[in-house]
C-alpha cells in the first residue's frame, strides 16, 4: 500500500544512512520501526498505582475541628504561595 508521511529531514537522513549500511530500503526501516513501536505498546502492562496508604492515629488533636484552610495555613507557614 502506498502512503505519504512527513519525516523530519534529519531523521530521514539518518534513516537513509542506516538503510544503506544495513543493505535495505527506507520502507523496510520504517516498517520495522512501526512494528517495534506497536509491539512495545501491546506488551506493556497497564499502569497500576500502588497502595501507599498507611495506618495512623488520625489528625493531631489541635487539628480535629480545624478547617482545610487552617491546616494548610500551618503546613505552609513561612513559605511563599
Image (cartoon, rainbow, N blue to C red):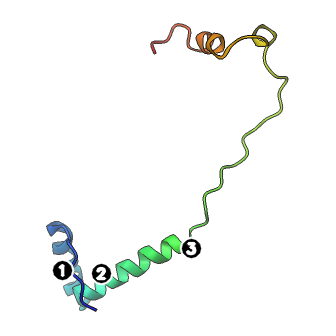
Taking 33 as reference, is 73 left or right?
Answer: right
Q: Secondary structure at mark 3?
A: helix
Image position of 46 with respect to 26: above or below: above
Q: Residue 74 occupies which quadrant of the picture?
A: top right
Q: Secondary structure at mark 1?
A: helix
Near-viewer residue (22 or 60): 60
> Within 10 angstroms of label 1, few (less than 14), some, or many (20 or more) residues?
some
Task: State the residue at coordinates (49%, 77%).
Answer: 39
Task: State the residue at coordinates (50%, 70%).
Answer: 41
Q: Residue 36 occupies which quadrant of the picture?
A: bottom left
Q: Which residue is mark 1?
A: 16
Taking 32 as reference, is 9 left or right?
Answer: left
> Within 10 angstroms of label 2, few (less than 14), some, or many (20 or more) residues?
few
Q: Position of residue 46 (x, y in %)?
A: 61, 63
Near-viewer residue (20 or 63): 63
Q: Position of residue 21 (x, y in %)?
A: 22, 85
Q: Which residue is mark 3?
A: 43
Task: State the residue at coordinates (61%, 13%).
Answer: 69
Image position of 1 with respect to 67: above or below: below
Q: Is the residue under label 1 in contact with that under label 2 (CB below 8 Å)? A: no
Counting residues from the start of the chain, the first of labels 1 and 3 encountered is 1
Counting residues from the start of the chain, the first of labels 2 and 1 encountered is 1
- Image depth: mark 1 or mark 3 in front: 3
- Image depth: mark 2 or mark 1 in front: 2
Counting residues from the start of the chain, the first of labels 3 and 2 encountered is 2
User: What is the C-alpha distance between the residues marked 1 and 3?
Assistant: 29 Å
Q: Quadrant of the N terminus?
A: bottom left
User: What is the C-alpha distance between the residues marked 3 and 2?
Assistant: 20 Å
Near-viewer residue (46 or 21): 46
Q: Which residue is mark 2?
A: 30
Amino acid at each position: 500500500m502506498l502512503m505519504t508521511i512527513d519525516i523530519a529531514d534529519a531523521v530521514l537522513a539518518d534513516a537513509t544512512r542506516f538503510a544503506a549500511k544495513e543493505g535495505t530500503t527506507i520502507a523496510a526501516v520504517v516498517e520495522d520501526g512501526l512494528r517495534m513501536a506497536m509491539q512495545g505498546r501491546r506488551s506493556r502492562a497497564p499502569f497500576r498505582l500502588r497502595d501507599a496508604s498507611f495506618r495512623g492515629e488520625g489528625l493531631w488533636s489541635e487539628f480535629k475541628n480545624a478547617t482545610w484552610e487552617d491546616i494548610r495555613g500551618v503546613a505552609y507557614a513561612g513559605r511563599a504561595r
